[in-house]
Amino acid sequence: MIAAPRHFAALAGRLRWDPAAIDLRADALAWPALSLERRARLTVLLAGFRVAESSVAEELAPFGPAADDRDTAAAFAAQHADEKRHAALFDRVAAEVLGLPGEGPQERRAAARAVTPAALLELFERRLPAAAAALATGRTDLAEAVGLYHMLLEGIVLGSGQRALLDDLADGALPGVRAGVELVERDERWHVGFGLRCLRDLEPDPTRVTTLLAEGEAAAAAWGDAVPVHVRARAEAMHRRRLVAVGLTRAAAGSRA
């Protein structure tokens, strides 16, 4: 059973945290001592999150107004506040740990794009803005936008990137970054659960569910070699289990019968 939308908004209030309070001083000192290979892998992941989290913070705005009820709109608003915190955290990491060039957030975002995989840029800087614009103008519905944003981008792409970061940093090499990613992952768990609840309530066309299932593998591969194959496979499997858990795949299978 998935909680009602009002539960997610209340949960967000209890989980709120301050990205400025994460201590990154030890991380900045430790970063140059990491191996070149490890720094290259972590740079792709952290720069990718720098780009992705800014994009989701910008593109969530039309979701709340598209909701049919006040509780769902409030949960979208709470998620929007979370995403702004995530973007602020990863901008700090880009500036204070990675040392990406730029006098401000937009310059650092541009620098992060240069090392972000093309597939991730396509998802977060082209497909997501297009879906948000279509939702805002009524050219698509909330179910389609939630399917892309919550299920594919958050549930698979960001979920697998968070897991890859936490696994890599389990040795305590970058304690502040790891602590921040743990907080982000905690937020994203309720975001994905909320998105799944929305999909269940919205009852999307079964062909859209079939498309969501088919797109899972490509979404899992968006990070390229920065995310290990077993982490990708686990994220894709979890995506399928979520859709099964709320009965959406049964509707899709029925539509093909």
Image (spheres, rainbow, N blue to C red):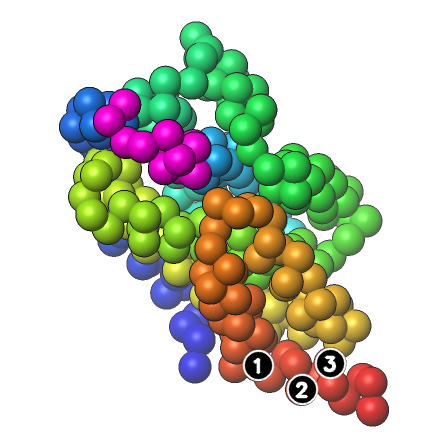
Looking at the image, residue 103 sits to the left or right of residue 121; the answer is left
Q: Which residues are magenta?
A: 32-43
Determine which residue is flagged by label 1: 244
Membership of 39 in magenta stretch: yes
Proximity of marks 3 and 1: CB atoms separated by less than 8 Å:
no
| Camera-side residue of 152 and 198 | 152
Amino acid type of the residue tagged 1 in the rendering: Val
Q: Earlier in the sequence, mark 3 or mark 1?
A: 1
Q: How many marks?
A: 3
- Percent position of residue 219, x then y: 62, 55
Mark 1 lies on a secondary structure that is helix
Looking at the image, residue 20 sits to the left or right of residue 234; the answer is left
Determine which residue is flagged by label 2: 250
Q: Residues within 10 Å of mark 2 (few under 14, many from 20)?
A: some
Residue 150 seen from this side? no
Q: Quadrant of the N terminus?
A: bottom left
Q: Which residue is at 75% across, 76% downward?
A: 206
- Percent position of residue 211, x then y: 74, 67
Q: Which residue is at 71% across, 43% downward?
A: 127
Q: CA distance from mark 3 to mark 2?
A: 5 Å
236 vs 168: above or below = below
Amino acid type of the residue tagged 3 in the rendering: Ala
| Camera-side residue of 243 and 202 | 243
Proximity of marks 3 and 2: CB atoms separated by less than 8 Å:
yes
**Which mark is on residue 252?**
3
Membership of 186 in magenta stretch: no
| Camera-side residue of 171 and 146 | 171
Q: Residues within 10 Å of mark 1 (few under 14, many from 20)?
A: few
Mark 3 lies on a secondary structure that is helix
- Percent position of residue 91, x then y: 40, 26
Q: Quadrant of residue 89?
A: top left
